[in-house]
Image: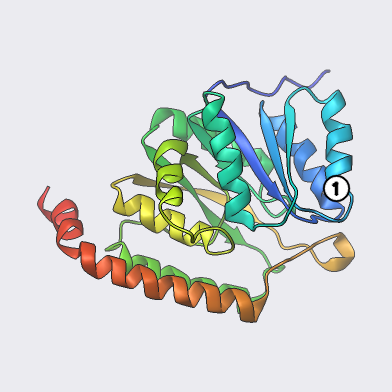
Amino acid sequence: MAAAPAPHSSTHLVLIPSYNPGSRGLETVRAACAHWDPVWVVVDGSTDGSAEALEVLARTEPRLRVLVRSRNGGKGAALLDGMRAAQRAGFTHVLAMDADGQHPAECIEPFMAASAAAPHAMILGAPSFDASAPRIRLRGRRIANWWTHVVTLGVGVRDTLFGFRVYPIGPLVEIMLRTRWMRRFDFDAEAAVRLSWRGIAVINLPAPCRYFSTAEGGVSHFNYWRDNVLLTSMYARLFLGFVARLPLLIARRYLV
């Protein structure tokens, strides 16, 4: 029996930023295409030949579009380029997922359905981790989640760093064009915080997360020193912004 065609949408697309994703990159894209149409990949200055491989795949996969950045700018920069192109093409929402296979393609359809039912909300993945998750990364997530809870007055963001999410394009692009930040690993956390400050509702949906070992083709570009410094400075900035917005946030949270 032939597989059912992937659902097609003229408003919602899957957007995958990709930088040297290793052997799992093509698998991730194929899996996304099996569950949704369309799928766009933004190749962020990759040097591992993955851009060429994806372009070859796109010649036979009508659901796939590949955008190539000449230089690496970071996850947020790649997503911003993709969202601006999607906005010009008439799309209103993107489901962001990573190219390394950690995010579950089988969750694309229920997340898109949740977004269609609540188009003004952001649909955030609430990950469940198995034994593959490094303990040091889990400890770091708990710290980040605590800070996000503080600076959003507890709007309900269950995981601030999990990148499997559906965003409304318009408000997120507007926010990003007003700042030089949100271009690298600070994107996921800052996007959730700043959208919540804009009054965008939060809907959390469960999703499994798998960390692949090097032997399994897993690739990580997270640098513990560089990126933890980036996240620490980000929360310092966000806390200052939180203090300035506190009266408005209290009014919106408790008085309206």
Locate residue 175, reporting x and y percent.
40, 49
Question: Do we see residue 22 in this rendering?
Answer: yes
Q: Decide: is 76 above or below 2.
A: below
Give the mark count.
1
Question: Do we see residue 159 in this rendering?
Answer: no
Q: Decide: is 56 above or below 153.
A: above
Q: Decide: is 129 above or below 118.
A: below
Question: Looking at the figure, which quarter contains the N terminus?
Answer: top right
Residue 206 vs residue 30, the one in the foreground: 30
Residue located beneath label 1 in the image: 50
- Residue at position x 49%, y 61% from top? 181
Label 1: element kind: helix
The image quarter containing residue 81 is top right
Q: Is residue 208 left or right of residue 196?
A: right
Locate residue 71, reporting x and y percent.
73, 54
Locate residue 123, reporting x and y percent.
46, 43
Q: Amino acid at mark 1?
A: Ser
